């Protein structure tokens, strides 16, 4: 047992993560390492919440005086109507991953957008005016689109199984040129010839399940392949790596979305190195 686990006091501030499931989440270890490093009397706990219980869980954040919560799959959209206010970004994305309890007023924000943008910077991606291919059109894709728009991307192709969802995503964002395409476009060399970034926002390819055929060789040699999933070597990343393309998983996004949430709750700068090390340690557990 570590000193950290013994340090719960009468004044300990509580934050957590609501989702279903949450047992696999790496956020508790990451945030608790950060609280310990800064000597903060705070604790971060996993809070499994079934879909039907989302309204009651949000009310409980107020009733129990939690300092805030992270929200994960599948509740990022469902929490919206139960909050008191949304940041403009959360409203634009239509999803909340971080709730801040401001003396009983619950503010919903979306730090996934910052997380993805910071991860791209970490990978050294230069995207201004360039073309990105986004695979998927769900909630995660919306955060990616917001980050890419803010990064000054010139053009985005959204490839998705369901055309209507891709079209709805394209309509949500202004700025870059937006094209929609079926998943078959992943095999079309003409669509891939000038892409600087390919992002998988779907859960396809997790554990050896099939990933739609992707003509990696048709992308430029320095095209960056990012999978939002973390902690798993996906078929998508393996194919890119085999072709010698630079790759990144979702770990950096997880880190940076968490760092922004940490600051929103505590008002303190997040100890990034401590949080990154905690994530790495967990990966090797
Ligand atoms: P999230 O909020 O995590 O993005 P989501 O909203 O359920 O989750 O979106 C999942 C994405 O993965 C969608 O783009 C979905 O495609 P559809 O819009 O056609 O549903 C995609 N996806 C999930 N399973 C898929 C499958 N078996 N084949 C192709 N695409 C799939």
Image (spheres, rainbow, N blue to C red):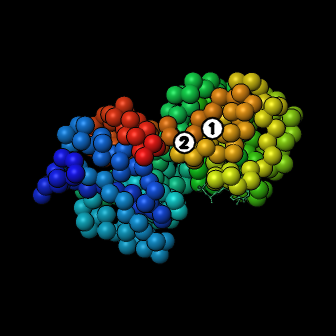
User: Could you tell whether 188 is left or right of 38 in the image?
Assistant: right
Q: Are marks 1 and 2 in contact (CB under 8 Å)?
A: yes
32 shown above or below 69:
above
Residue 231 seen in the current view: yes
Q: Is mark 1 within 8 Å of ligand 1?
A: no
The residue under the point 32% across, 57% down is 45
Q: Residues within 10 Å of mark 2 (few under 14, many from 20)?
A: some
**Image quadrant where residue 263 sits:** top left
User: Could you tell whether 113 is left or right of 240 in the image?
Assistant: left
Extreme residue toward the left, this view: 10
Q: Position of residue 152 (x, y in %)?
A: 62, 30
**Image quadrant where residue 240 sits:** top right
Q: Is mark 2 within 8 Å of ligand 1?
A: no
User: Could you tell whether 179 is left or right of 111 in the image?
Assistant: right
The residue under the point 13% across, 55% down is 9
Q: Position of residue 65 (x, y in %)?
A: 24, 61
- Choose between 16 and 78: the one closer to the eye: 16
Q: Residues within 10 Å of mark 1 (few under 14, many from 20)?
A: many
- Choose between 8 and 177: the one closer to the eye: 8
The number of callouts visible is 2
Residue wearing tag 2: 250
Disc number for residue 226: 1
- Measured in 3D between alpha carbons, the distance from the residue under mark 1 to the one under mark 2, in whole angstroms, is 7 Å
Q: Position of residue 283 (x, y in %)?
A: 46, 43
């Amino acid at each position: 047992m570590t000193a950290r686990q013994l340090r719960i006091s009468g004044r300990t501030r509580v934050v957590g993560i609501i989702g279903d499931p949450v047992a696999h989440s790496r956020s508790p270890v990451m945030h608790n390492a950060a609280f310990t490093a800064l000597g903060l009397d705070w604790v971060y706990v996993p809070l499994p919440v079934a879909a039907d219980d989302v309204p009651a869980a949000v009310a409980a954040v107020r009733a129990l005086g939690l300092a805030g919560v992270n929200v994960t799959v599948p509740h990022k959209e469902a929490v919206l109507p139960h909050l008191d206010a949304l940041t403009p970004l959360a409203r634009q994305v239509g999803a909340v991953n971080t709730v801040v309890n401001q003396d009983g007023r619950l503010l919903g924000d979306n730090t996934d957008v910052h997380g993805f943008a910071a991860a791209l910077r970490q990978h050294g991606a230069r995207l201004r005016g360039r073309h990105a291919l986004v695979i998927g059109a769900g909630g995660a894709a919306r955060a990616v689109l917001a980050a890419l728009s803010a990064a000054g991307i010139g053009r985005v192709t959204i490839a998705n199984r369901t055309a209507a969802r891709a079209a709805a995503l394209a309509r949500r964002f202004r700025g870059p040129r937006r094209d929609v395409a079926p998943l078959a476009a992943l095999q079309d060399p003409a669509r891939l010839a000038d892409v600087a970034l390919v992002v998988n926002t779907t859960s396809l390819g997790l554990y050896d399940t099939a990933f739609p055929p992707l003509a990696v060789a048709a992308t430029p040699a320095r095209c960056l392949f990012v999978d939002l999933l973390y902690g798993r070597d996906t078929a998508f990343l393996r194919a890119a790596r085999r072709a010698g393309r630079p790759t990144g998983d979702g770990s950096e996004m997880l880190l940076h979305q968490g760092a922004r949430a940490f600051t929103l709750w505590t008002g303190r700068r997040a100890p990034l190195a401590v949080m990154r090390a905690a994530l790495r340690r967990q990966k090797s557990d």
